[in-house]
Image (cartoon, rainbow, N blue to C red):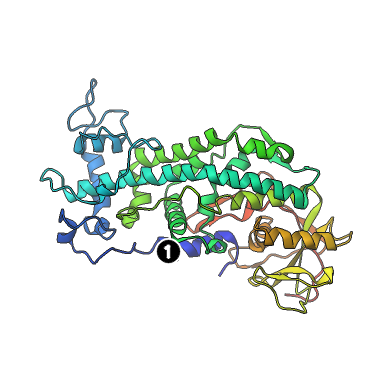
Amino acid sequence: MGFFLGIFVQVLITSIAAAPVESVQARDLATCQDPNAGIDPSCWDLLDLTTYVTNWNKTTPVCPPGPTTGKCCGATEAWTTCFLRMNQPQSGSDCTELSSCAFSPTLASIPNDVHMTAQVHYIIFNIYALNFFFSSWYTAMAYATTQAQTAVDGIIQEIDPKKKASGKLNEILTGLTLGLAFLGAPEAAVVGKVAATAASVLITGLQQAPGTVKALWPQDTTDSQLWQMASLSDSLGTLDKQIRGRINAALHEVMTDVPTFLAFVVHGQFSNPSPPSIDKETDGLDQALKTYLVSKALDANAMFGFMAHHYLTCPVSYNSMGECITDDPALTDWHSNNSNADYNIVPNGGTADLRPQNEILHNLLQKGYTTGRQLFDGAATCNGMWNTQLEAWNDLEQFHYYQPPEGQQLFTVSAQGIDFSCVSQWTIFHGADAHPP
């Protein structure tokens, strides 16, 4: 099994998100159509709702010029808005914008209305539930931003007292909004069930919906603004409009494009009496950004990662964070169980005293600014040292510096999963191996 973040998220998707959503109770087709039975994930497939939505969109005519009324959709009307107008006219809802329609638990009960089929009810429910999901995500970003501001002060104190680090402001936005998907990585396994479920359904949707990925994280931006560590805490406080714009753009894509909508609701992920959402004070949504900032600050201060196979032998047991901590700084490192490589932080390739850097390593991990897997393993993958296809090290030059490719994005999305390796934008120095791996 591959050991870096992108591969691990693939494992999470396979084992959690792609599996059938757990039903509240066993269902058959008749029960799914019963107004008194309530909503259940299994009914999405039993009612063949993917086919139902696809056919509805293909067969519903476009309204002629003039007022948009009746059993047709306006030329520029979102299909979800049209669906609600035709089947729930009393609501007048348009769910294409954040918090534009109010989700209520009462929606989980199928109305005892001869004019509303179970299929119609489930689609209405999913439209509302998706709006609720994206709206709750945006609401939680305020708390995540506050956490990130606190972390900036700590990172400055630990590794960047002269505030040398800088970079593209777009990467700050990307790192912060990646946070929910980033919770799907295994090192976030301690997060609560609510956050873990939200992360897995988001990842599943993003894999099948490239339009949503582009809306959330535009990669062709011409924005040349830079961030400086000295003013980053203040800058984070001004990003609410951009964060809202990105999440709102993703929601709009979901609500206006049928395949994107289906990518998120497939197999009943949102057909649950308590559909996925994210609590407004969810810890860890700033984790991707913190790892990015740590890597940039280390690089800016000429503190690089040092990697060698079997280089260090720990005379004591490794702690829960993978550290070997001894009184001798030369024997203090972070060990990757997956690659059997040893890592440390050294200034300029290890030409100065190691002790302060080992204290930094311990503090960064202990205080939760990053993890060894995110910082070290991630950078080694991003820098081309590790071959994810072969799950083996590439041929590496000894005493050589490996850096992220110029212009490398912080993440990539593929059918295999989301690869977050390049969240760690850090230089890794490959030292001499004690013996071949």
Q: Residue at x 29, y 58 (%)?
A: 41
Residue at 50% over, 41% down: 216
Res. 404 visible in picture? no
Q: Look at the image and tell me whether residue 276 can be seen.
A: yes
Left or right, 298 with respect to 114, comes to: right
- Residue 304 lies, with reference to residue 57, above or below; the image says below
For the point 41% across and 40% down, the residue is: 251
Q: Position of residue 108 (x, y in %)?
A: 25, 51
Q: Secondary structure at mark 1?
A: helix
Residue 222 drawn above or below residue 284? above
Quarter occupied by residue 168: top right
Q: Position of residue 289 (x, y in %)?
A: 62, 48
Categorize mark 1 by other alpha carbons within 10 Å: few (<14), some (14-19), many (20+).
Answer: some
Q: Which x, y percent locates residue 232?
A: 68, 39
The image quadrant that residue 79 belongs to is top left
**Image-based side of 65 in relation to 344, left or right:** left
Q: Which residue is mark 1?
A: 16
Q: Position of residue 62 (x, y in %)?
A: 24, 30
Q: Amino acid at mark 1?
A: Ile
Q: Nearer the viewer, residue 55 or 351?
A: 351
Write down the quadrant of residue 377 in the picture: bottom right
Residue 260 lies left or right of residue 59; in this view the side is right
- Quarter in which the C terminus is drawn: bottom right
Residue 64 in the image: above or below residue 426: above
Which residue is outermost to the left?
A: 114
- The residue most toward the top is 66
Q: Quadrant of the N terminus?
A: bottom right
* Left or right, residue 225 beside residue 196: right
